[in-house]
Image: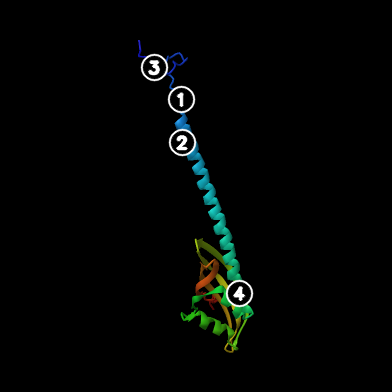
Amino acid sequence: MRPHSPYPESSNPSNEVACKEVFVLTKPKRIIAAGMAFLLGVAMATAWARQRSRSDEGSHVLALDNSWNRALETKDTKALDLLLADTFVSVDIDGSMETKRQFLAGIKAPDYHPSQAVTEQSTVEVYGDSAVVVGVFRSKGVDKGKTYVNRERFVDTWVKINGTWKCVASVTVLIPSKQSSD
């Protein structure tokens, strides 16, 4: 005779014992499980809301970055002044650095005539109160009597200062035009 088993015998001819696991939650375990499920739901909803907020903030920063182009084309230094932080630093395609004041003075210069400033493509990543925009920018015009047509890769760093997004740094690198081999 075999020892008493909590599991019923199988009805198969080999008389094997069928192992049935019964998962029974006591009242305290049910409360804990419900609480954990609730907390998991709250965590997922919070993560989704943060992702959506980052997406909304990213769209806002991209719009500001694109408005920079329009301000360049029209030499609107007042609009640029609003977009750029007082501590703004620009690193240009030749490696030179400019402060906000110097950058705006260059835009105002009477011998600077931009005719086109277009972002071909850009992406943004938001990190709390900071955002980084990376993209490709095309510009053409006349500067100091010389016509230019440039294609540049740029990295713009934006920071939310007192609730307002401001660009604090911009770095551009010239993308060389492809030369045909003769």
**79 left or right, relative to 17:** right
Q: Could you tell me which secondary element the residue under label 1 belongs to?
A: loop
Tell me the residue that label 1 is attached to. 22
Q: Nearer the viewer, mark 2 or mark 1?
A: 2
**127 left or right, relative to 140:** left
For image coordinates 54% across by 55% down, the residue present is 51
Closest to the observer, 136 or 125: 125
Q: Which quadrant is the C terminus positioned in?
A: bottom right
Label 2: few (<14), some (14–19) or many (≥20) C-alpha neighbours in 10 Å:
few
Q: Which mark is residue 79?
A: none
Q: Could you tell me which secondary element the residue under label 3 belongs to?
A: loop
Q: Nearer the viewer, mark 1 or mark 4?
A: 1
Q: Which mark is residue 32?
A: 2
- Asked whether residue 154 is in view, the answer is no
Mark 2 or mark 1, which has the lower sequence index?
Answer: 1
Tell me the residue that label 3 is attached to. 5
* Above or below 39: residue 77: below
User: Mark 2 touching mark 1, by CB under 8 A?
Assistant: no
